[in-house]
Image: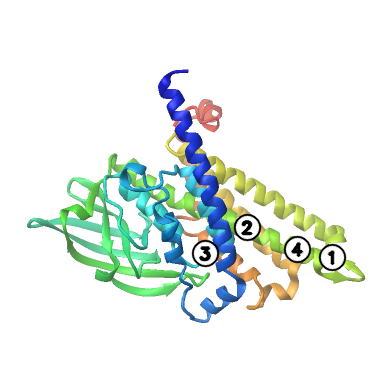
Amino acid sequence: MSVQQEVDESCSAERDEVAGVMTEQVGRLLASEVSVERLTAIERGDAVPALWGKFAELGLPSAMVPEDAGGIGLDIAQGMLLIRLCGYHAAPAPLAETMVSLHLWTRVGGQPVPGQVTFASPRAGRLRVEPAGSRLRVHGKLTRAPWCSDGHLLAVVEGRAGHSIALLPASALETISRKSIANEPRGDVTVDLTLEQSAKRVLPIDVRAIDDVLQLGALMRAQQMVGAMQRVLDVSITYAQERVQFGRPISKFQAVQHMLASCATEYAAASAAAEQAAGSWGRAGQELAVAVAKSRCGEAAGHIAATAHQIHGAIGFTKEYVLHHFIRRLWSWRDEFSNETFWQRRLGHLVCAKGGAAIWPLLLGEIE
């Protein structure tokens, strides 16, 4: 083993240790701060808990920013573990979006910015960028941009020289505020503003880099869905063990056991696909892995949501019960950054373009 390999392995081990510590800290923080009662209060319009300051104290927004840019330096796979936790606890703040946005922005040479940062899907609309003297004019529209009322919005913009990525101040955007089915903020944004040159960064490779933005958003939502599916499964198992019918817990009935087993199977498949996609980021087979993960998680989300409601019966539909907070997030997230139908078509085109002889090497990640 060369000296460089030893250094790389040592650095990787240190980052894994840091990621483990952060995962534990974030899990404890979310478990203590995000209760069913608090989520229900937010649904009624109460103020969001002051989570963001606590996230900032732990350095979580810049967790996926390189160390030389002032971040913690977690890689995609390590950062996605934190994002999965956000899904498990239904974190009522855009931590996942901020982590990914700052990773994208610093990857193309931008400097980290404080506060919340979100990013829009490249398929959510079209923004144009044009010279305006020594500055830049950005204009266009985006639909259903997540958490875009505060901080900054990161978006792909199209200009004469190709595509770039721009950091837009949310306060300067004309936004029609909406809510997703999960009651999370989504906004239809009209952009017409001038920016300094430093607010735009050229993407390193034109079309592929744009697709990376879409793929990273899909991977983020897949990880959040896996976290939410795990929570739904945990809640369903607990309920089945506690709910007594005909003199015994319903978990003792074979039909209920079968439903729980089918949910566990779907969760395991989705979790494995999301983990594989995170581990494949930046390597051969990335696009295939992300397409599989987003489509597989979308399918699993539908099955687990329906089956969990069968297990719970009427109580699963009540506002006071925990289940709907996670079910509605599954329904919302499966459609964002493109749904399973889009990604299954992408899979089909990818496989057909490579030809039949390339299917096995493609599955093994030996070719792009």
The residue carrying pointer 4 sits among few (fewer than 14), some (14 to 19) or many (20 or more) residues within 10 Å by Cα, namely few
* Lower sequence index among marks 3 and 2: 3
* Lower sequence index among marks 1 and 4: 4
Q: State left or right for residue 73 relative to residue 351.
A: left
**Which is nearer the eye, 267 or 340?**
267
Residue that mark 4 sits on: 238
Residue at (63, 78) in percent of width and height: 319
* Lower sequence index among marks 2 and 4: 2
* Lower sequence index among marks 2 and 1: 2
Residue at (40, 23) in percent of width and height: 4
Give the residue type that dot 2 points to. Answer: Met
Residue that mark 3 sits on: 91
Residue that mark 2 sits on: 229
Does residue 233 sit above or below 51 in this rendering?
A: above
Q: Which mark is residue 250?
A: 1
Report the Cα–Cα distance between label 3 and label 4: 21 Å
**Which is nearer the eye, 94 or 360?**
94
**Which is nearer the eye, 326 or 368?**
326
Give the residue type that dot 1 points to. Answer: Ile
